[in-house]
Amino acid sequence: MNRLFFLLILLFIQRGSAQISDTILDMVISKPFFYNVINNKDGHILTGSSDGIYEWVGNDYKLLDPSKGYVTLDQKGRPVILKEGINKYNEKSFLYLLPYPEMIRDEYHASGNGKFYIVSGGRLYIYDIVPYRITYQNHSVRTISQEITGTYSGIYCKGRRLGEGFPLFSDGYVRKIGDRHFLCSFGLVIIDRDTISPLGVSSITIDWEAFSEPVNDILLSEYDKQYYLSGESSLFQLSADLKSIKKIYQSGKGNKNVTLIGQIYDRIYFSAGNNLLILHPQTQKIDTLTSLQEPVISGFLTNRQTYLLGANGLYAQNSENDRLEKIVSLEKAHSLVAISGSEIAISSDNGLFLYNTVSRILQPLIPGVEFNRRALFIDNNVLRAGSINGLYSIRIQDFATVIAHNTVPAQKQDIPFWTKAGLAVFGILAALLGFLFYKTSRRLKKMKEDYEELSADMLTREKIESYIRDNLAIASLKTITEYFDTNNSRIYNLLVPDKPGNIIQQLRFEKIQEMNASGASASEMAEVTGLSESYIRKVRSKE
């Protein structure tokens, strides 16, 4: 058991669980040869191997018996080896967790102490069991509602991809209002909840000329029953019968970040650049309430507090004294949602966090994962957060468990004198070895740089853009990663400072202009670019 081979950490989905949970592969051990894994009568983990019978607690192990082969329990519950081996194999229920899940092979599994163990093909796979679920794996999830999930590779309803008539992807919110879903994209797609089919954007007599930019959010005013939509730099008003639309606000030069914040009574709150604004629908008057030192990206309202999120932290303004205060710093933040009267979930490029407004403590829920803007949603006491690699779902009641799972408490221990002396000697020896380590590390660094240079030559931004141009109708982050046999993070790194979706969108616009100049029809453009004919006609009418 002296040679361990550790593979890269991967994410897998554990389906069919009664609770919201998932598995994350922690390590793979390839030597010795493992035959099977079982639980003993006390729930401990035992493996049979070519080195003998091992007992496992987490990732730690000890040899119980040097006997080799398949382990089982005798009538007294003691571990013994099946001398005749296993004649008939029945367990295959967790093959989907393994690499190449379509390959039918032996698989034995057991669980204990927050770990899940699988033996297959002579290897031992050890997984962490985490108190949340990951779905839409390898999809970049951009927006979420009760039934609709928007990704860079399609729009889905309860796991089923919606086909013709729906956008290929969306960067805006999807909001459920009444019995309809309003999908904010290049225009506004209105989806009937019962039939899950577009009502036909072109059949709704809306002046599409008013939409001079992509739409990112919508709300229905409880006061005047009108719809209000935010674009990149504008605020629009859509009539209750969906038949007329007008622009009621245009941000100044450079203030392109217009965001709907919410409504209180008859007032509509929205932001433009650094400013929080109030619209009075009856008079169409717009007032500035407050300003940040950075653009407002997201926010929400309560009767006493207004919470605003910038890329570098969270701000709060008390409605009684209008005092604005930065209450927590957080880099690359972009979305927030109220969990309760005292808890706020915040997503960022660096993870998902929980902030308590009473204790003023920020704690990590899912650290180290890049989450997408506008992909944060609460439904039936479950927090759903879209990332570049999938959709995370966490029950609110499990927050403390998730936070504890991410936190390893430090244990204070008294160190005996002889231990301290031994550590001092060890320090001296380490210093003597330092020079050799320094020389070796420099050599390894050079080897790493050479490897990264070689890797960079294999896949470049130019190759990615060439693939997108040749496959505009189907291009998405998912198809790019599948074509080049790579992962989302590498594609993002190669395209910095741009994002895949923005490049796809830009190349589609360029193709529309090229085909329009050559006299191509809207249907021909739609077939080549993957965009809807109605949107292409709108773009052409502006040229």
Image: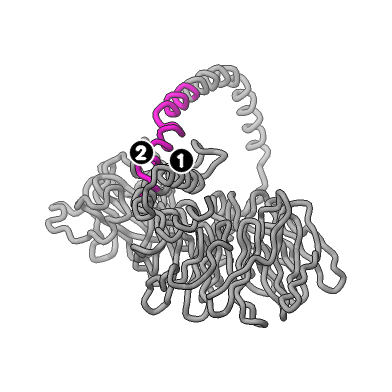
Q: Position of residue 408 (x, y in %)?
A: 58, 53
Q: Is residue 99 visible?
A: yes
* Residue at x 38% of width, y 50% of height: 525
Residue 22 versus residue 193: which sits nearer the camera?
A: 193
Q: What residue is pinned by disc 2?
A: 484
**Hey, which residue is sitting farthest right in the picture?**
321
Residue 406 versus residue 55: which sits nearer the camera?
A: 406
Name which of mark 2 and mark 1 comes first in the sequence: 2
Q: Is residue 405 above or below residue 477?
A: below
Residue 77 appears in which quarter of the rendering?
Answer: bottom left
Q: Is residue 404 visible?
A: no
Residue 308 versus residue 256: which sits nearer the camera?
A: 256
Q: Is residue 438 above or below residue 186?
A: above
Say which mark, if any, is on residue 503: none
From which residue to which does the magenta span run? 449-475
* Residue at x 67% of width, y 82% of height: 223
Q: Position of residue 50 (x, y in %)?
A: 25, 42
Give neighbour class at mark 1: few <14, some 14-19, many 20+ (Cα, 10 Å): many
Q: Position of residue 124 (x, y in %)?
A: 32, 47
Q: How many marks?
A: 2
Q: Is residue 344 above or below residue 118?
A: below
Secondary structure mostly taken by the magenta-highlighted segment of the chain: helix
- Whether the magenta-drawn stretch holds residue 145 is answered as no
* Residue at x 21% of width, y 48% of height: 69
- Whether the magenta-drawn stretch holds residue 462 is answered as yes
Q: What residue is pinned by disc 1?
A: 491
Q: Position of residue 482 (x, y in %)?
A: 34, 44
Left or right of 400 in this view: 76: left
Residue 315 versus residue 540: which sits nearer the camera?
A: 540
**Hey, which residue is sitting farthest front in the picture?**
519
Q: Secondary structure at mark 2?
A: helix
